[in-house]
Amino acid sequence: MKSQLADFISLIYPRVCLHCRKPLSRAEEFLCLPCELSLPKSTYLTNKEDLCKKFAFQPKVIAAYAYLDFNKFGIAQKLVHNLKYQGKKDLGTWLGARFGRDLSKQDHAPFDLLIPSPLHANRQRHRGYNQSTCLAQGMSEPLSLPVCEDAVARTKETTTQTKKSKLKRWENMESVFTVTKPKEIEGRHILLVDDVITSGATIGMLCDELAKENPASISVAALAAGK
């Protein structure tokens, strides 16, 4: 009965690939198989040192990973847009699971705990969810790690970073975060999860706040990163 209902609904509201817009089969989610196989997997997934250079100022950061290469008008941009602005919460869990599965196969840094980059309360209330939390929840099972989504809070609502210079991005992120559960941080190997890394300003300031609570180490994991 459920499959018949799903088939009927798909006739009225056909499920299509988020990238190529072709109809999806019952076994496909979000992307058709050809588009999923053509995902631009980043070299930052297998090389934890290169992306880490963006955080050279913070000695607690020992590794940084990205699942996809972020290019304007590319498939990664479409996925991030759908995750953040089209209400596709489940897309974040789906992508996070694939990211976590691939990361688990690498010679990665030690991790004890997943912490998603927080949204300001106003923005999360408007969106209905935090996309970084969705990604972290998807990564949790393949990496066998717990998620602590309230260990850190975003106390300042900032303007968009998109059109700012690198210096302005860093200035825009001053005094934005505060750690709310320092005992969850101390002595732990933290894997910090975010959606996109460009300049590294947002996640860099968050790393600085976490470092004040003396974690054993901090690693960064982003769904996508610009080259």
Image (cartoon, rainbow, N blue to C red):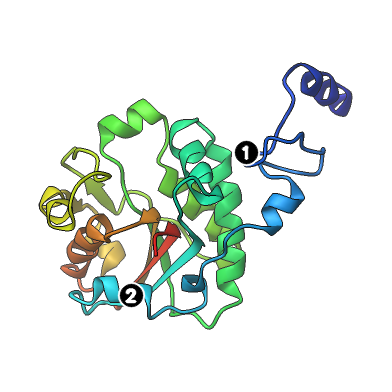
Amino acid identity at mark 2? Cys
Look at the numbered disc 2 and give the secondary structure of its residue. Answer: helix
Q: Which mark is residue 52?
A: 2
Confirm whether residue 15 shows in the render. Answer: yes
Residue 226, given in percent of the width and then of the height, sits at: 39, 60
Q: CA distance from mark 1 to mark 2?
A: 30 Å
Q: Is residue 36 left or right of residue 49?
A: right
Image vertical order of residue 93 relative to residue 189, above or below: above
145, 177: nearer the viewer: 177
Q: Is residue 98 left or right of residue 110?
A: right
Look at the numbered disc 1 and give the secondary structure of its residue. Answer: loop
Residue 188, given in percent of the width and then of the height, sits at: 33, 73
- Which quadrant of the structure image shows residue 9? top right
* Residue depicted at x 53% and y 59%: 140
Image vertical order of residue 179 relative to residue 25, above or below: below
* Precedes in sequence: disc 1 or disc 2: 1
Furthest toward the front, the residue is 73
* Residue depicted at x 18% and y 40%: 158
- Which quadrant of the structure image shows residue 62? bottom left
The residue identified by callout 1 is 18
Q: Residues within 10 Å of mark 1 (few under 14, many from 20)?
A: some
* Residue depicted at x 77% and y 37%: 24
For discs 1 and 2, the disc positioned in front in the rendered view: 1
Amino acid identity at mark 1? Leu
131, 23: nearer the viewer: 23
Residue 180, given in percent of the width and then of the height, sits at: 22, 52
- Which quadrant of the structure image shows residue 60? bottom left
Q: Is residue 102 left or right of residue 190?
A: right
Residue 152, given in percent of the width and then of the height, sits at: 26, 52
Q: Which mark is residue 88?
A: none
